[in-house]
Image (cartoon, rainbow, N blue to C red):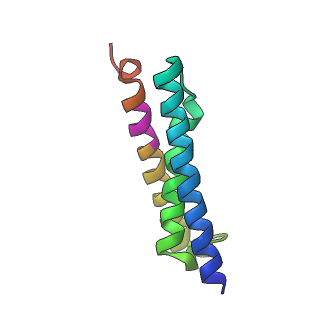
Amino acid sequence: MQTIKKRVLGLVLILLGIGLIYFNWHQLLKDGSYSLKLAAFGPLVGVGGLFLIFFPSMGGKPNTAKEKIIVLIVFVIGLAAGLLNWYLMDPGFFGS
């Protein structure tokens, strides 16, 4: 039962991440402005949701060193996705 709850939470996080990314892109295309925090952390939420769907047993606080490293790697992947999203939204920010 806990596995199903964690996978449902993962699905909710994926949908939330998609919604945050969509909202930010919509705001950029409509108003010409965007939220830096949403650009960086929207994809992170989605990656965390994917992680929960594929590895529901890893949900919760990591206990072992191996679990902590895995969670850190997932976090870095999510931040990299956020950085890519930010770059796609504002490539002029990264280069002159």
Residue drawn where x is 51% and y is 49% of the image: 18
Q: Nearer the viewer, residue 11 or 41?
A: 11
Work out whether 62 lies above or below 24: below
Q: Residue at x 44, y 32 (%)?
A: 86
The spot of residue 11 in percent (x, y) is 55, 65
Nearer to us in this view, 85 or 33: 33
Q: Is residue 45 above or below residue 28?
A: below
**17 or 70, nearer to the observer:** 17
In this rendering, does residue 69 appear at all? Answer: no
Which quadrant is the C terminus positioned in? top left
Q: Position of residue 65 (x, y in %)?
A: 55, 71
Circle count: 0
The residue at 66%/71% (across/down) is 60
Predominant secondary structure, magenta span: helix
Direction top: furthest residue: 96
Quadrant for the N terminus in the image: bottom right
Q: Residue furthest front?
A: 30
Residue at 54% across / 62% down in the picture? Answer: 49
Residue furthest bottom as drawn = 1
Q: Is residue 95 magenta?
A: no
**Percent x, y of residue 30:** 50, 22
Viewer can see residue 21? yes
Q: Which residues are magenta?
A: 82-87
State which quadrant residue 7 falls in. Answer: bottom right
